[in-house]
């Protein structure tokens, strides 16, 4: 603690400045104890003053939580101020609420800091006073002076593992480190505003003021303060924006320093444990680690725990530490509990050292309507936000699961990636598998989209309309948007999206764009059927697009090189798979989509100017569809001696792209491929080898084995035929001798 002398005699106001380390359990415990001793009549805390009205909500919140400041209409300009249960500032807030003491924030207003971020082109988490720049790391400097090579370990030994925090010593140490230091422009503004807030509290007549701030700022708030006019000059003319603030849930994963938070810590779970278990923390920690390992099926006994505790204390003693720290307990757990298994150590690191805790805010917390609607739906659908990955399987035939699917798809359309859709374990279109993980950024994304509507469904529908109205949206993206609207059950947006799609498709002359767009349209039509959602007008657009593809395909296949042929072939396969999902019957005199598509492929396949890859693939598609009875003759022509070997290899690659079992079941086709390969010269074989490897390497192992066995058996049959072509007269003597040996001689 550092007391600021104030004119007015011995009975004048006293200001106690408590320098802390943000998110330090030792500092948090010491701050709470010191406040109970000082009994201040007001408390000033480092943070944005616009959040003063939100302080009264703190006792109802479940940390970790964060203050979120954002600029309405400019979602990229936002900042977070996180708090954990072991944050000294949080404990000061809770003390003030319990004791009825006013609590204010005293840092530079978010209206100014967010405007400064815009000027510098920066966004992101507020750094809690640990400003970047050229100044030295104060904790590192003090640790080095004490002979420590690790600043974190020094802070733990000096502060976190003590029963109290030596505020006076920290203040003196920081004054020594800051001697001769000139703050940068941003830091000077922050500290000037802190002093301005302090002067205002003194002017209001408070007699016992407690200031909770980062230890680095203590020297700027103690001793003789600079004239108020000088600080006012520093703050004059600052850029300003409109900022709105609220509380949002936070996670220990985001609190960890590796997540990018400037004043983060590497081990929030460990610090939470130290704060919650001041007595016997090592024993309690290792016992909990053993429980975590047992939950994963690992055999860990009480004897393991006792031995690991003994080892941790021994390591601390050998290293001259007052108490075993995270390093010692981790080494003890690795050696004894995990028996050297790095995967088990990683499990403890993820579950305990960092932790999976997700904070909670109450219904009374300021929220945009979109956030509140999502909160209501999460309760109705029994989908609790969690910090760790959680996998759920949805059966879309069940109303509850269907509503869950609609919600997750709507959030995806809004850019809120709470759920990631994976491959369903079940078969059919009635199942979905999602992986859910809530991140603090999702609240910011909801705030960004708040202008679109007051409900998730309304906002998602408006988002779809906005995307459809954008000229820059590609045709394939529009078809994907139709699919999203059906998956998210947004019938109110579908007419405008379909109208935009129809207009764009009518103007797009690139057949590959149409081919890329058609599969999503067919899937969308199918989803409209299985989910019971209406997609009127979709069938007309699908037929129109397919007709234009059939008309444009003969031109698109002309004059293609290898890369272009491979690219077009992907579109052909995708369209062919999509057409298979359409009904096979036409309406009245209309030709069915499947028949129209196959007629087009048959006409193209008869051309002589096709790339070998295209011709081979079309031949295979038509053969599998039952539209060809001369596939063998076509293969024979493609692999005749008059063809260039590279083109023949490309033909084979295209033909066999549908799978290699055809060669197992059709001896003639296998014989043609085998004869072509054996007829190649050494140089020719070398030229086509990369294509052959790519072709046969794409087959499943059982397919390759079956083809090899078929070739071997065919070769054995040929050799057997050669053995039957013998001179019987010359063999008669040998046969007679063998019969005699076997006792079969009749003579």
Image: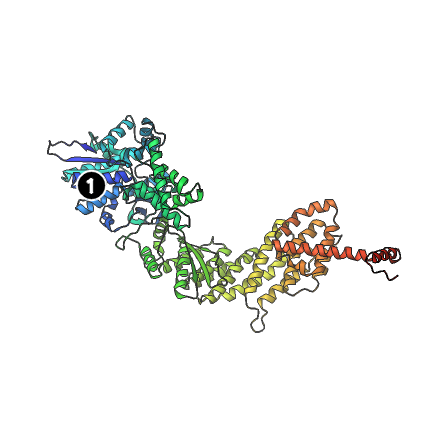
Is residue 83 or residue 642 the one in the foreground?
83
Percent from the top left, x then y, of residue 596? 60, 66
- Dividing the picture into quadrants, the one containing residue 302 is top left
Q: Is residue 393 above or below residue 96?
A: below
- Dividing the picture into quadrants, the one containing residue 218 is top left
Percent from the top left, x then y, of residue 646? 69, 49
In percent of the image, x 39 and y 59: which residue is there?
Answer: 407
Q: Residue furthest bottom?
A: 588
Q: Is residue 635 visible?
A: yes
> Along the horizontal axis of the image, is 573 left or right of 675?
left
> Along the horizontal axis of the image, is 200 left or right of 115?
left
Q: Which residue is mark 1?
A: 43
Q: Is residue 465 visible?
A: no
Is residue 319 or residue 78 the one in the foreground?
319
- Which color scheme does this rendered protein use? rainbow
Percent from the top left, x then y, of residue 323? 30, 35
State which quarter of the image contains the C terminus. Answer: bottom right
- Numbered label tally: 1
In percent of the image, x 75 and y 57: which residue is there?
Answer: 717
State which quarter of the image contains the N terminus. Answer: top left
Percent from the top left, x then y, of residue 159? 28, 35
Mark 1 residue element: strand
Q: Specify few, some or many for label 1: CA neighbours under 10 Å numbering under 14, 14-19, or 20 or more.
A: many
């Amino acid at each position: 603690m550092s007391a600021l002398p104030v004119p007015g005699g011995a009975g004048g106001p006293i200001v106690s400045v408590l320098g802390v380390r943000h998110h330090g359990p030792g500092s948090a415990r010491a701050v709470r104890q010191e406040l109970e001793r000082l009994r201040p009549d007001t408390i000033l805390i480092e943070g944005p003053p616009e959040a003063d009205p939100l302080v009264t909500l703190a006792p109802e919140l479940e940390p970790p939580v964060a203050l979120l400041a954002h600029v309405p209409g400019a979602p990229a300009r936002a900042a977070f101020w996180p708090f954990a249960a072991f944050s000294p500032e949080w404990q000061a807030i809770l003390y003030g609420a319990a004791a009825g003491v006013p609590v204010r924030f005293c840092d530079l207003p978010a209206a100014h800091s967010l405007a400064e971020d815009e000027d510098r082109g920066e966004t992101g988490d507020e750094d809690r006073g640990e400003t970047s720049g050229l100044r030295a790391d104060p904790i590192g400097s003090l640790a080095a002076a004490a002979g420590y090579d690790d600043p974190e370990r020094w802070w733990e030994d000096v502060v976190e593992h003590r029963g109290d925090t030596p505020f006076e010593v920290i203040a003196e140490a920081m004054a020594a480190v800051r001697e001769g230091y000139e703050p940068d422009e941003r830091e000077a503004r922050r500290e000037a505003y802190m002093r301005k807030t302090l002067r205002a509290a003194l002017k209001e007549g408070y007699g016992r003021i407690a200031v909770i701030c980062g230890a680095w700022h203590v020297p700027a708030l103690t001793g003789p303060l600079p004239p108020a006019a000088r600080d006012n000059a520093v703050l004059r003319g600052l850029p300003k924006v409109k900022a709105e603030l609220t509380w949002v849930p936070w996670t220990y994963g985001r609190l960890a320093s590796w997540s990018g938070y400037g004043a983060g810590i590497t081990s929030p779970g460990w610090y939470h444990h130290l704060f919650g278990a001041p007595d016997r923390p090592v024993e309690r920690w290792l016992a909990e680690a053993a429980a975590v390992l047992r939950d994963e099926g690992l055999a860990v006994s009480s004897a393991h725990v006792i031995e690991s505790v003994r080892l941790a204390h021994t390591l601390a003693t050998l290293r001259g530490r007052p108490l075993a720290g995270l390093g010692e307990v981790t080494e003890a757990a690795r050696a004894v509990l995990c028996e050297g298994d790095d995967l088990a150590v990683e499990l403890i690191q993820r579950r305990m050292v960092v932790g999976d805790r997700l904070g909670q805010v109450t219904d009374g917390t300021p929220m945009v309507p979109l956030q509140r609607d999502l909160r209501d739906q999460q309760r109705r659908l029994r989908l609790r936000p969690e910090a760790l990955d959680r996998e759920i399987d949805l059966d879309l035939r069940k109303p509850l699961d269907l509503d869950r699917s609609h919600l997750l798809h709507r959030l995806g359309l809004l850019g809120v990636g709470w759920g990631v859709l994976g491959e369903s374990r079940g078969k059919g279109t009635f199942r979905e598998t999602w992986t859910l993980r809530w991140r603090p950024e999702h609240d910011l994304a909801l705030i960004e989209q708040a202008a679109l509507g007051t409900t998730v469904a309304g906002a998602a529908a408006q988002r779809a309309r906005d995307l459809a109205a954008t000229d820059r949206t590609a045709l394939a993206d529009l078809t994907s948007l139709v699919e999203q609207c059906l998956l998210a059950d947004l019938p109110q947006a579908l007419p405008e999206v379909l109208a935009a799609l129809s207009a764009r498709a009518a103007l797009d002359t690139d057949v590959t764009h149409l081919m890329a767009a058609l599969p999503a349209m067919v899937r969308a039509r199918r989803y409209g059927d299985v989910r019971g959602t209406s997609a009127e007008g979709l069938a007309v657009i699908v037929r129109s697009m397919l007709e234009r593809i059939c008309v444009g395909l003969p031109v698109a296949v002309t004059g293609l090189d290898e890369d272009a042929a491979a690219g077009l072939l992907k579109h052909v396969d995708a369209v062919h798979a999509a057409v298979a999902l359409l009904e096979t019957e036409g309406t009245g005199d209309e030709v069915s989509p499947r028949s129209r598509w196959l007629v087009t492929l048959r006409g193209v396949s008869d051309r002589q100017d096709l790339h070998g890859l295209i011709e081979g693939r079309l031949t295979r598609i038509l053969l599998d569809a039952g539209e060809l009875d001369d596939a063998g003759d076509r293969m024979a022509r493609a692999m005749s001696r008059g063809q260039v070997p590279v083109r023949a290899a490309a033909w084979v690659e295209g033909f066999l792209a549908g799978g290699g079992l055809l060669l197992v079941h059709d001896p003639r086709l296998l014989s043609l491929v085998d004869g072509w390969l054996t007829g190649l010269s050494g140089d020719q074989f070398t030229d086509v080898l990369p294509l052959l490897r790519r072709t046969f390497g794409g087959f499943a192992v059982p397919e390759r084995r079956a083809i090899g066995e078929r070739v071997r058996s065919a070769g054995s049959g040929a050799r057997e035929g050669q053995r039957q072509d013998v001179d019987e007269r010359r063999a008669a003597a040998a046969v007679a001798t063998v019969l005699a040996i076997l006792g079969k001689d009749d003579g």
